[in-house]
Image (cartoon, grey):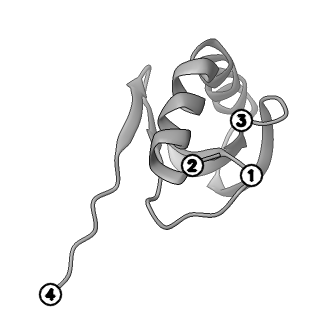
Amino acid sequence: MVYSVVPTVLYEQGVRGLLYLDDHHPAHVHCFVGDGQIVVLLEPGVAVRETHGRVTAAEQRRVLALVEARRGRLLRRWREIHGR
């Protein structure tokens, strides 16, 4: 059985943000909150790319605010893993 490591890069206020090692550009983070997932772009600015499952408007606002506040750190981590 093969397991892949998926770095958790954000974990607060009920939000877990992951960067998949074999993921594609543009830079983004997969955020799990409540019963759903929000894929948030990091470049050129913070924006929702897509949602999966059930995500409330309040959860979406919370995720976007957290990602915006930590965007620099998240981008640095993305670049360490995926390059520019």
Question: In the structure shown, which secondary structural element does the residue marked by tag 3 occupy?
Answer: loop
Q: Where is residue 56 in the image (x, y as percent from the top left)?
A: 69, 37
Taking the spot 41% from the left edge, 34% from the top edge, the residue there is 9
CA gap, disc 4 to disc 3? 33 Å
Taking the spot 20% from the left edge, 82% from the top edge, the residue there is 2
Quick one: label 2 or label 1, which is nearer the N terminus?
Answer: 1
Compare residues 27 and 47 and report the one nearer the observer: 27
Marks 2 and 1 close (CB-CB < 8 Å): no
Q: Residues within 10 Å of mark 4 (few under 14, many from 20)?
A: few
Quick one: label 3 or label 1, which is nearer the N terminus?
Answer: 1
Residue position for label 1: 26
> What amino acid is labelled 4 in the image?
Met
CA gap, disc 4 to disc 1? 30 Å
- Badge number at residue 42: 3
- Badge number at residue 1: 4
Q: Nearer the viewer, mark 2 or mark 3?
A: 2
Q: Is residue 1 left or right of residue 28?
A: left
Q: Position of residue 43 (x, y in %)?
A: 78, 36
Res. 33 visible in picture: no
